[in-house]
Amino acid sequence: MAPSDGKRPQVKCVVLAYSGGLDTSIIIPWLRENYGCEVVAMVGDVGQGDDFRAVRQKALDTGASKVFVEDLREEFITRYLWKALQAGAIYEGKYLLGTSLARPVLAKRQVELALDLGADAVAHGCTGKGNDQVRFELTYKALAPQLRVIAPWREWSIKSREDALEYARHHNVPVSVTKKDIYSRDQNIWHLSHEGGPLETGLGEPPEDAWKLSRSPQHAADHEAEVTVGLEAGVPVSVNGKKLGSVRLLENLNALAAENGVGRTDIVENRLVGIKSHGAYETPGGTLLHAAHQELEALCLDRETFHYKQHVALKYAELVYYGQWFTPLREALDSSIETTQRNVTGTVTLGLYRGNVRVLDRRSPYSLYDTSIGGFSMGPDYDQRDAEGFINILGLPIKLAGAKRAATQGRGKALRRRAG
């Protein structure tokens, strides 16, 4: 942050996490004006589907000295998304952490590039109210605490997206955002988020024009689509029996789920900074994968591990959301989760119909479901008469507490009768 006396520290070269969106587009000329430094733009391809040639040229046209476009899709999926999937990490029961998981992989590559180039600072376009500033900067602190951090939204006089649009106009910076389409969006191969505009001023259902990836459930096909997802040790490996690489697998599931209106989430969430925000998320393929993974875990994990892992999932989701990816605790949880996933292997068939997902079948060579004892029929492996002793032992403390309570109440009634 800039010193209170208005004098900014000397910076020779800054690496900016650049997307080509409104915020980062105006940051390049702002950094040059206010810091007089060289600006290198780092564009991370995490599957957002941008025209990266155009993004590169835009950064150069607005003052960047160099632009690096980094293909991070494989790393993002295999080292971040799959780990969160294995953990079962879902923030506040709804958010599948699309933006939260992308930030550490982007910031990590940004730091690596800054160190390779000998830059003395890194910068991002996150606002001072959001979670992303925390996610970027905690990664910087973990991997390269010596680098200076420049966060323009905490320094400049721009206060709104309308102000940012005005700045862009004055500096001849082309932007795709308009006052008519004022949504703030973030997209990667896992999801597309929508914030701002009508979502900021109202808590009702998002307007249909807010959604971009998925077909409206009302307009989806009036027949159920089926898909079989295969996992090995908790990691997705196949679709309909065909082995696929991680990028193609996720792209295929995204297309199928989006076509059937699956993956839309309208959420009021608790931001890390203490503010509640209203957003809309589209996570089509991720919704299918979480459904399949949960079913296999229910089939393959013993009761105590399954229940305990639900606690781990909550903590893991918080760590990701709070930007604490590069921490000893997250690494420790990964080691524990990896052990729980050894037998989470098999296939799950899902039915997709107008925004809904249901389980049609689940199979695993490590299934703990045993038909000989899982049904109502008597079998040699389970003697129902044993239940009496089990209940007696389990209920002993409850029985003793009940007897004590009854005796105490009885003495109380007797005392009241004597007093009366």
Image: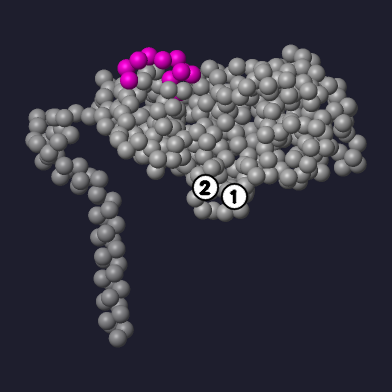
> Which structural element holds mark 1?
helix
The residue segment tinted magenta is: 240-250
The x, y position of residue 228, in whole percent, is: 32, 24
Task: Identify residue type, mark 1.
Answer: Pro
Q: Are marks 1 and 2 in contact (CB under 8 Å)?
A: yes
Give the image location of residue 179, x and y in percent.
68, 44
Specify whether residue 245 is painted magenta: yes
In the image, 413 versus 126, the foreground residue is 126
Query: Which of the two residues, 206 or 150, is positioned nearer the viewer here?
Result: 206
Which of 259/86 is in front? 259
Is 161 left or right of 324, judged from the image as shown? right
Disc 1 to disc 2, how far (Cα)? 7 Å
Examine the rendered structure and indicate whether residue 201 appears above or below residue 185. below
Quadrant in which the N terminus appears:
top right
Q: Inspect the image, locate mark 2, and give the three-letter code of the amino acid beneath it.
A: Pro
Residue 261: x, y in percent? 41, 37
Find residue 394 and report its image quarter. Answer: top left
Please report the residue visible at 33 percent of the width from the left and 26 percent of the height from the top: 227
Q: Is residue 42 left or right of residue 246?
A: right
Which of the labelled discs sits on residue 61, or is there none? none
Residue on which the image places disc 2? 206
Q: Position of residue 409 (x, y in %)?
A: 29, 69
Residue 255 drawn above or below residue 206: above
- Residue 183 placement, left or right of 61: left
Please identify the quadrant where the C terminus is shown.
Answer: bottom left
Q: Residues within 10 Å of mark 2 (few under 14, many from 20)?
A: some
Q: Is residue 20 visible?
A: yes
Q: Position of 21 compared to 414: left or right? A: right
Residue 342 appears in the picture as rendered: no
What residue sits 32% from the left and 17% below the top? Answer: 241
The disc at residue 198 is 1
